[in-house]
Image (tube, rainbow, N blue to C red):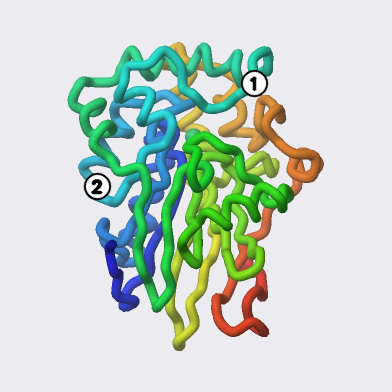
């Protein structure tokens, strides 16, 4: 198990999704915060909806941050025929995956497939006296959708966690929530906005400040028009190119009612302090 010292923050993020421009912007943000690659952790799905699958995978690999496998890495490493995203048959998401997954699969080098196949499925670590575990979707199922409003699902997943904090990805919307003694931290994804009507993408930080351990979610503005233009130029223009600009998902199929109802509502940045029970969750807003 990795034991990070708390002299520097950890930067955590999900879903680069073949969005090279956003991934480059995230690296610039990490550099600006003086966070070295060994303190950066990706929750998987390096390759998905956008225009630059091979380039984004290579960029992440060369950056040298920690990465765990998402369902996309597992499927591409196996040269599988679909993304195994857990979209239901007949839904818009499933139909869209028939466009972007073959596009990515056709462009992936053997070298990058081997890199994906060699990534770990999970990453346990300690930071500031707390135990963490990084997963992609659910604690034991790589492609499970885990949303903030589904408290029974979260309780079930946290019961399997074997860690104080789960850092997860896959579902694409940033949140930090607590059930009992467990904390679920989804820092959001860097490759696609979270359906809040803005083009910004999201990452998270884990920091110790004045003896307090802080989990936080953060917006990142980047050259989203250029990313969308790259998709159109590649001939890979699809509904997700519009999403990069409008900040609205092409389909709400996977969302529970509460998250669906939040469509187009600007998401606030959040901070949770892990401390005594009295200070367990302050959810103090930081200015967006
Ligand atoms: Fe995923």
Asked whether mark 2 lies closer than 8 Å to ligand 1, one says no
Relative to residue 20, is residue 195 drawn left or right? right
Q: In terms of sequence position, does the residue under pointer 1 or pointer 2 come before the other?
A: 2
Residue drawn at the location 61% of the way across and 44% of the way down: 146
Image coords of residue 175 (percent x, y)? 62, 55
Residue drawn at the location 67% of the way across and 31% of the way down: 254
Relative to residue 276, is residue 27 drawn left or right? left
Residue with the mark numbered 2: 63
Q: Is residue 226 above or below residue 222?
A: above
Residue drawn at the location 52% of the way across and 40% of the way down: 170
Image coords of residue 83 (percent x, y)? 46, 22
Total labels: the figure holds 2
Image coords of residue 24 (percent x, y)? 35, 44
Visible in this render: residue 122?
A: yes
- The C terminus is located in which quarter? bottom right
- The N terminus is located in which quarter? bottom left
Image coords of residue 132 (percent x, y)? 43, 63
Q: Is residue 85 above or below residue 271?
A: above
Q: Quadrant of residue 197?
A: top right
Mark 1 to mark 2 CA distance (whole Å):
34 Å
The local secondary structure at tag 2 comes to helix
The local secondary structure at tag 1 comes to loop
Asked whether mark 1 lies closer than 8 Å to ligand 1, one says no
Residue with the mark numbered 1: 88
In the depicted view, which residue is nearer to us: 287 or 191?
191
């Amino acid at each position: 198990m990795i034991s990070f010292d708390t002299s520097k923050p950890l930067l955590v993020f999900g879903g680069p999704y073949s969005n090279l421009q956003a991934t480059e912007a995230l690296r610039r943000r990490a550099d600006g915060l003086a966070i070295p690659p060994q303190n950066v952790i990706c929750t998987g799905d390096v390759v998905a909806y956008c225009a630059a699958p091979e380039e984004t995978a290579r960029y992440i690999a060369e950056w040298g941050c920690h990465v765990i496998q998402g369902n996309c890495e597992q499927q591409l490493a196996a040269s599988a025929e679909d993304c195994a995203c857990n979209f239901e048959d007949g839904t818009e998401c499933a139909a869209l995956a028939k466009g972007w997954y073959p596009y990515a699969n056709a462009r992936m080098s053997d070298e990058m497939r081997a890199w994906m196949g060699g990534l770990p499925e999970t990453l346990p670590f300690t930071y500031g006296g707390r135990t963490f575990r990084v997963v992609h979707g659910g604690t034991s199922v790589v492609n499970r959708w885990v949303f903030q409003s589904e408290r029974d699902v979260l309780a079930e997943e946290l019961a399997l966690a074997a860690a104080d904090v789960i850092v997860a990805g896959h579902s694409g919307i940033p949140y930090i929530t607590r059930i009992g003694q467990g904390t679920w931290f989804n820092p959001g994804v860097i490759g696609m906005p979270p359906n809040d009507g803005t083009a910004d993408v999201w990452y998270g930080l884990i920091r110790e400040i004045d003896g307090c351990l802080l989990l936080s979610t953060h917006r990142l503005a980047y050259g989203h028009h250029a990313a969308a233009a790259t998709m159109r130029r590649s001939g890979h223009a699809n509904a997700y190119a519009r999403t990069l600009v409008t900040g609205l998902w092409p389909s709400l199929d996977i969302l529970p009612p509460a998250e669906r109802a939040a469509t187009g509502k600007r998401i606030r940045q959040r901070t949770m302090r892990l401390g005594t029970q009295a200070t367990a969750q302050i959810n103090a807003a930081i200015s967006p």
